[in-house]
Image: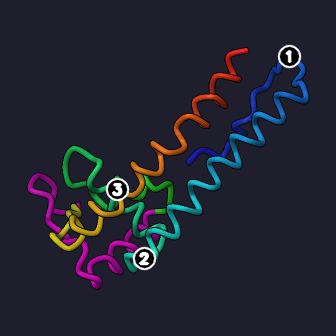
Amino acid sequence: MTTSSPLPKNTTRQLSDADYETLASFRHALRRFIVFSEAVAVTEGLATQQHQALLAIKGLARSPSVGELAERLMIRHHSAVELVGRLVRMGLVSRLPDPTDRRRVRVSLTPLAEQKLAGLSAAHLEELRAIRPLLVSLLDRFDD
């Protein structure tokens, strides 16, 4: 994570009321999706961060190291170690030694995690398809 401000240094145009309305609507749509995601994760007995970790592991080309997982989730390494420990105790991930670097531990999903993640991901894709028209229309407003 960077510590510098993500705000642009030079803003060349004045924002209109419509810009603020679009930004607020877009932020609201994202927040509604996040609330949906949190609720559906709970139905599978997962905390939001646990679901995010499973998706991150599945979404990477190979089993990530704990450090790579921390980077992907934008959390500190020691937090990722604790998260992986909880997921191991839940039977959702396995720790594997890195074949090329014995100091590094890789993380992979168990069949139980694969099953939970498949259901969660299907629900998320369905929700995204439902809100796609709204998101697209809001994003199109940024072109003006």
Instruction: Give the SS element for disc 3.
Output: helix
The alpha-carbon separation of the residues under discs 1 and 3 comes to 39 Å
| Amino acid on which disc 2 is placed | Thr
Question: Callout 3 environment at 10 Å: few (<14), some (14 to 19), or many (20+)?
Answer: some
Mark nearer the viewer, 1 or 3: 3
The alpha-carbon separation of the residues under discs 3 and 2 comes to 13 Å
| Amino acid on which disc 1 is placed | Arg
Query: Is 20 in front, or is 127?
Result: 127
- x, y (%) of residue 116? 28, 69
The alpha-carbon separation of the residues under discs 1 and 2 comes to 45 Å
Report which residue position mark 3 lands on.
121
- x, y (%) of residue 35? 59, 63
Report which residue position mark 1 lands on.
13
| Residue occupying image coordinates x 75% and y 28% | 8
Instruction: Give the SS element for disc 2.
Output: helix
Tag 1 near tag 2, CB within 8 Å: no
